[in-house]
Each structure stands twice: as C-alpha cells, then as structure tokens.
Amino acid sequence: MVRRGYDRSARGYLAARRGNAGSPINEFLAEVVKAVPQGGAVLDLGCGAGDPVAVAFAERCVVTGVDISGAQLALARSRVPGATFIHADMATVAFPADAFDAVVAYFSIIHLPREAHADLFARIAAWLRPGGIFAGTLGHGDSPSDIAPDWYGAPMYWSHFDSPTNIRLVTQAGLIPEIAELRGVDETFLCMLARKPGG
C-alpha cells in the first residue's frame, strides 16, 4: 500500500512538502544538517522525491537515498543528480557497518509496521560510524495501524508508538538521544536526534 500510494501521489506530495519550507519540522532539519560534518556520508532513509533531506545535504555531504517508490525515486534523481538513490524497502535494505555519519528518516519510519521499528533502529545504529547521528520524525501517539482511504489521491498506511516508547527503542538500539521534542503546526512529530557513542 505504501509503495503504490507514493507512486500515485508522488508529484502532489512533493508539492505539499515544498510548501512547508518554513515549518518547525524543517527548522529541525536545519539543526540536523549543522550536526553533520562537511563531506560526511548521509543516508536519507525513505527519501521520497529528495525533499527535504537530500536537497538539504546535497551541497555539503555525500548523500545516499533509499525509497520503496520508483516514482518518488525518479523525481529524486532529477532533483538531486549528485546523490545515489537505491530502490529498496527500508525494512530489508542492508549496508555495511560504520558506513554513514548520519542516517536521516523524515516522514518514513511511520510507514513501517511498528513491530519492525526496534530492529530498524538497531540496524541504523550499526550503519552509523562512532559519533554519528540518527535523526528522524517519529510518531508521538499509540497507533498500531492506521489507513487513510484517500491521501493525496491514494490509500496510505501508518504505524507508530508513542513518544516514550520511541525514545526507549532508540536508546535500546545503543543511541543516545540529544533532542526528543514534539514539533509541528498542522502536523506534529517527535523530532529525534540521537548519537552513537564514540568518535
């Protein structure tokens, strides 16, 4: 459902996200960008059309994007030609240990069944170099499964835990939260920045 939904809604969703340039969510992204060293390796997990994460990092870091939607990736490749984009499911994609200085997941982990979140956080921690950061927009309420029949013209699925559970799972994965705040206006997320020890 997520893949089909983003394939069908790719351009409409991109237009909506580009209209949120000054939102608290994107202000958080500006903080994340500053936390990553110049020339660092960044994984945009669930990159969509490359907006906002790949675009934000494109001129100062080496960016790899992963997304399940081919239509979204086509937009991303045209908008951020210097990045590498991989058509894959974040639930199963694999990378070497210590491959990235940052893994950033904007509006994406909430589309994965929450039973898979703990495993994903552990894999993210393994992909990070010592001192590297995970930053993402996570759910803040208890929602085992939510389906909208018409979201930008297509059905869409979400699943997430409440804020305390998300903080606990990220901590259990071996990451140290530095920011864990609810931010947003029309839509609110738990904005999380957590660091891998060392470095």
Image (cartoon, rainbow, N blue to C red):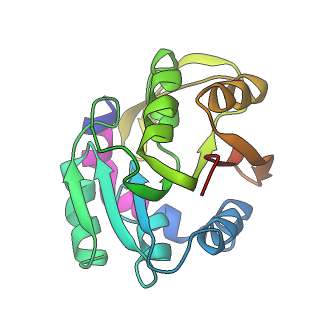
Coordinates of residue 181 in the picture (x, y in percent): 80, 47
Give 72 or 91, whichever is nearer the viewer: 91
- Can you name the residue that lies furthest to the bottom here? 59
Whether residue 74 is visible here, answered yes or no, is yes
| Residue 82 to residue 96: above or below | below
Residue interval drawn in magenta: 5-14
When the figure is inspected, residue 153 is found, relative to residue 81, above or below; the finding is above
**Does 109 sit above or below residue 135?**
above
* Front position in the image: 10 or 90: 90
Image-based side of 38 in relation to 191, left or right? left
Residue 142: give x, y in percent of width and height. 69, 19
Question: Visible in this render: residue 146?
Answer: no
Q: Quadrant of the N terminus?
A: top left
Percent x, y of residue 30 = 65, 72
Residue 14 horizontal side relative to residue 179, left or right = left
Q: For the point 29% across and 44% down, which residue is it?
A: 95
Which is more toward the observer, 158 or 47?
47
Q: Number of labelled discs? A: 0
User: How far across and down, in percent of the image, does residue 174 sit?
Assistant: 62, 33
Give me the residue at 57% from left, 69% from top.
36
Quarter of the image where one finds residue 63: bottom left
The C terminus is located in which quarter? Answer: bottom right
**What residue is shown at x 47% (from left), y 49% (from top)?**
128
Residue 69 colored in magenta in the image: no
Prevailing secondary structure of the magenta residues: helix
The image quarter in which residue 55 lies: bottom left
